[in-house]
Amino acid sequence: MSISMKVNGSSVSVDGDPEMPLLWALREKLGLTGTKFGCGIAQCGACMVHMNGEAVPSCQVTVSAAQDADITTIEGLGANGLHPVQKAWVQLDVPQCGYCQSGMIMAAAALLERVKQPTIEDIDTSITNICRCGTYVRIRKAILEAAKA
Amino acid sequence: MSTITTSRRGLLGAFVSAAGVATFNVVLPGVARAVMADPAGAGDIEVSSWIVIEPDGMVRLRIPQAEMGQGVETALSQLIVEEMDLDWGKFRTEFVDPQVNRNRNNVYVHTATLNSWGVDLLFEPMRQAGAQVRAMLMQAAGARLGLPPEQLRVAANRITDASGERSIGFGEIAADAAKLPIPDAKTITLKPRAAWRHIGKPHHRLDTLAKSTGKAVYGIDVTLPDMVYAAVRQSPVFGGRLRSFDEAVIAGRPGVLKVVAIRGGPSGYTTPPSLWDIIDFQMDDAVAVVADSWWTAQKALDDLPIVWDEGEHAAVSSESIAQELDALVSKPGKSVRSEGDTDRALEGAVKTIQSDYHFPFVQHAPMEPMSCVALVNDDGVEAWGGTQYADEALRIAAYAAGVALKDAKFHSTYIGGAFGRRLSQDYVSQAVQIAKRMRGRPVKLIWSREETTRRSYYPPVAQTRFTGGIDGEKRVVAWKAQAAFGSAPFQPYGLSRIPFAIPNVEIEYSGIQTPPPFGWMRGVAHTQGTWMSLGFASELAELAGVSSYDFHLSLLDETSIPADRPDRDDAIARIRRQRRLLQEVVKRAGGPTRSGRGRGRGIGITDMSYIPGYHASCAAMAVDVTLDGKGGIKVEKVFAVVDVGTAVNPQNVEAQVQGGINYGISNALFGKLTLKDGRIEQGNFDEYQLMKLAEAPDIDVHIMPSDGRPSGIGEEGTPAVVSALVDAVHAAGGPRIRRLPIMDQELLLRKS
């Protein structure tokens, strides 16, 4: 069975079990390893992608549920140069191990789509991704910085 | 068949690790996958073991430490760049090849990534390496240009004369330079501090762009042609053996290729020089399912009936371990520090108190689950992944494959968090054992989150019974600590190295074997001992009717150190330093206390010192919390002051202090694993809470100016902040925290 979707602006079709989580299709079938596996149960946010403009944990979206959807991964976020969130991340040296940061950046970019000038409280309550290196102080600063762009 | 209609390059592109370690293209299924390119391209010249120069003059620096977030790749680069006079940005890095390290008699000096030692132990060797290669390039260029080397300088990866009119590129002269003998390190003069352009300057991390665009390659991302995927399950009971599994249940499922029994056994050593026992890690039996995708493999594994011989630990629980520890602290243990006559001083004290402190099992919980890619074929074994000790990963890979060490290769990738976990090479052994059964095909092993939680190497549980007494003038006259630790090397230092000047001190230590095996974790046993000791000091302060801060200062009094104390000089130096930092942090926080209902400020200090004379960083913290009176706690602000000697990359020191603090707070607020029927009960993050943005405080970091030799900073934030946090809870009107985690106790309702 072959399921069509748009990934980072390209039309692709994914073969195999339609119940496979999108996360694994992105990573193993499409080679987009920037999207990370952390928990598999939508707790950590490392697998976050944009699906039709909304941030979703790709471990919870089956390939069949993504049929005809428009998916953006971290590789596609800055397709035309770095996204303002990525620019702020680079400017403030946010990542440490970096493993959670793809998901964190996708969550931050989605937040800024919804709320142009978020407060720290907006950030703290709407982003629930886990960063085990504890880069939270710089994450907050970088989102506020990106909001100025 | 997958198809791409547009923008192929935008979708896929080439994945290049910033470390330059693995360059490979990822392409869609149905198209032949590109092979990982050999990082040493044609024409590259290895000028010394540390530095390679490419034909176009690009320099590659070899990094002997694992990059797991601590920023060591950047800091170590700064050291070489400084002495080579490279321009920032005109170089790349690669992780060292453990086979080269082995063949060249440990030329990379310090390759185990542990104990915050990277910059500390490599500060001299890496600067020397840079200076040596610079001298070789100068000499070679001088011969070519017909000029004395002292009239030459380095600019933009070229060597030029004073006027800049005559010059020669690194790439043109590298081959000549490589033929010269490497100058003796003793003949090399390193740059004086005043001439530093990179050391001590806040450089951006080298890996930030790759880590902000999804391009950084971790072990879990390594992709090879014809690769298959494996999921693994180990005995749920520690020490259990594999008896059988019923392969027929999953046989014939689409995509499932094989079921493999994995044998338990050695999983690597850590050998920190002289400070501790050698740790000989062991792993248990396991079963792996191999499939054409990881999800398929894990699903089949979940359905695979496995019978375990649960062994001797099947009845062990957190409660049974707690009882063992409790029995132990009542009995005399091994005396690790004894000054004066503590029992007599306690008898003579005006007031005495006794309290027990408890530390639970916790886990590292790196965001990247354990993973490794391995290939076994006629050439031997080749493995890719993130490890804190590539030399041991190499050895374990060879052992698991059953090949000679010379026929093994290991390629280090970036690591998605480790915190000590990846000092055991269990996942490397497993991947290789599976690959051995899939001969000729690369296998990517990935652990589920549950497996990562339940089969780790854990910092020890601990209980300490403190007894202390004060005299009529509110001075501490006696301090006794009787500690009992779970499986661990001898780790009394968090308790025995308390810096306080007290005339009668007795520290005893006992250990028991607990089924969850020992592992190093960020903060090591300072994590257990420091907050317990400082917490008890605060209890004595309350007994004396003195503020916690004033009491700490009164104990950090060098004039009270007995003249006959054997480590007197060390004790005085530590007291001076900790006192200075504690005063500084309280000044920066605006005072030792703060007022307001439910609001509290606590203080903590540590120097992560193990033995007298140990070269360690020092940290002091003040933590502000608010208790809402309904059981809720908000950690609002942390002030940190650190002395790390020379801060090689100050912005990274700040990041490490912030990260270490959040790691400590997360563990102290939430961290707790429990054991039942010999098994870890928690599996995923819905059962093991970690700090998120909503719990993360604002953190202000101040780095004390220093000309000293650099010391580590990856860990210092962790123990100090826990001490300050529990102190703050009490100051805010909450209870005395004697048992972690804080949120485990419904005690935050006490009225102030």
Image: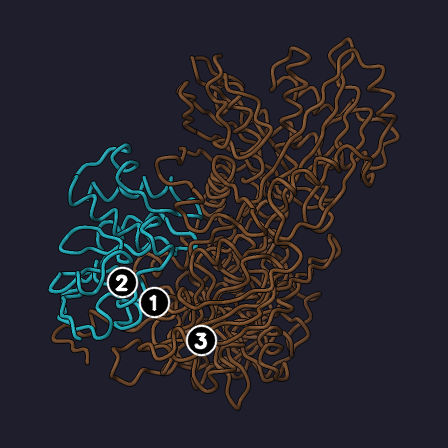
Give chain B's shade: brown
Looking at the image, tell me whether mark 3 or mark 1 is earlier in sequence order.
Answer: 3
| CA gap, disc 3 and disc 1 | 18 Å
Three-letter residue code for mark 3: Glu
Residue occupying image coordinates x 39% and y 63%? B89
- Quarter of the rendering occupied by the N terminus of chain B: bottom left
**Subunit of label 1:** B
Q: Are marks 2 and 3 in contact (CB under 8 Å)?
A: no
Callout 2: chain: A
Above or below B370: residue A92: above
Confirm or deny contact between disc 1 and disc 2 (CB under 8 A): yes
Report which residue position mark 3 lands on. B247
Q: What residue is shown at x 65% (from left), y 68% (from top)?
A: B266
Judge the density around disc 2: few (<14), some (14-19), many (≥20) Cα neighbours within 10 Å.
many
Determine contact: label 3, label 1, CB under 8 Å.
Answer: no
**Both on one chain, marks 2 and 3?**
no
User: What is the spatial separation of the Cα atoms under label 1 and label 2, in whole angstroms?
Assistant: 8 Å
Q: In which chain is the residue bearing label 3?
A: B
For mark 1, what is the residue? B295
Q: Colour of chain A?
A: cyan
Q: Amino acid at mark 2?
A: Pro
Q: Which residue is mark 2?
A: A21
x then y, percent, for residue B312: 67, 57
Confirm whether circles 1 and 2 share one chain. no
Instruction: Name the foreground residue: B607 vs B416.
Output: B416
* Residue A142 in view (yes/no): yes
Q: Disc 2 vs disc 3: which is toward the camera? A: 3
Amino acid bearing label 1 = Trp
**Dot 1 crowding, Cα within 10 Å, few <14, some 14–19, many 20+:** many
Regarding residue B145, the answer to whether it shows in the image is: no
* B600 is higher (above) or lower (below) than B457: above
Q: Decide which of B146, A62 is in the foreground and name it.
A: A62
